[in-house]
Amino acid sequence: MLGRLGKKQMEIASSFLTSAGGFGGAAFVTLLYFTDWKVFVANIPFYGGKFAGQEEEK
């Protein structure tokens, strides 16, 4: 199957990379919004220290 991909198909695929990156980023942010975002944010340097002294809410 990969042998059938030529230069033109690679050019077409590369034109979609920015859109795919944008949609992927939006999907990731949506995932963070609907999940436990503190787990992810706690691992961001400098910003994660904001949650160091807080206990988990139940």
Image (cartoon, rainbow, N blue to C red):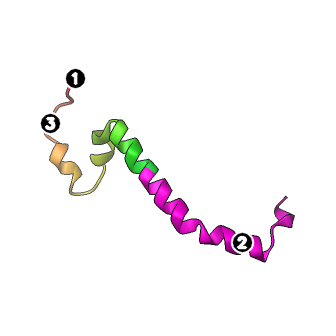
- Give the SS element for disc 2: helix
- Give the SS element for disc 3: loop
Residue 14's spot in the image, x, y percent?
63, 71
Residue 25's spot in the image, x, y percent?
44, 56
Residue type highlighted by circle 3: Gln
Label 2 – label 3 distance at C-alpha:
49 Å
Of badges 1 and 2, the one in the foreground is 2
* Residue at image mark 2: 10
Residue type highlighted by circle 2: Met
Question: Quick one: 17 or 43, which is closer to the camera?
Answer: 17
Q: Residue at x 54, y 60 (%)?
A: 20
Residue type highlighted by circle 1: Lys
In this picture, residue 10 sits left or right of residue 2 = left
- Residue numbers of the magenta segment: 1-26
Residue 34 sits in which quadrant?
top left
Q: Residue at x 31, y 49 (%)?
A: 43
Residue 32's spot in the image, x, y percent?
36, 43
Label 1 – label 2 distance at C-alpha:
50 Å
In this picture, residue 9 sits left or right of residue 23 = right
Q: Which mark is residue 54?
A: 3
Question: Quick one: 15 or 40, which is closer to the camera?
Answer: 15
Residue 51 sits in which quadrant?
top left
Per the image, is 21 magenta? Answer: yes
Q: Is residue 34 above or below residue 3?
A: above
Q: Residue at x 22, y 23 (%)?
A: 58
| Label tally | 3
Q: Which mark is residue 58?
A: 1
For marks 1 and 2 on the same chain, the one whose residue lies earlier in the sequence: 2
Residue 24's spot in the image, x, y percent?
49, 54
Q: Residues within 10 Å of mark 3 (few under 14, many from 20)?
A: few
In which quadrant will I find the N terminus?
bottom right
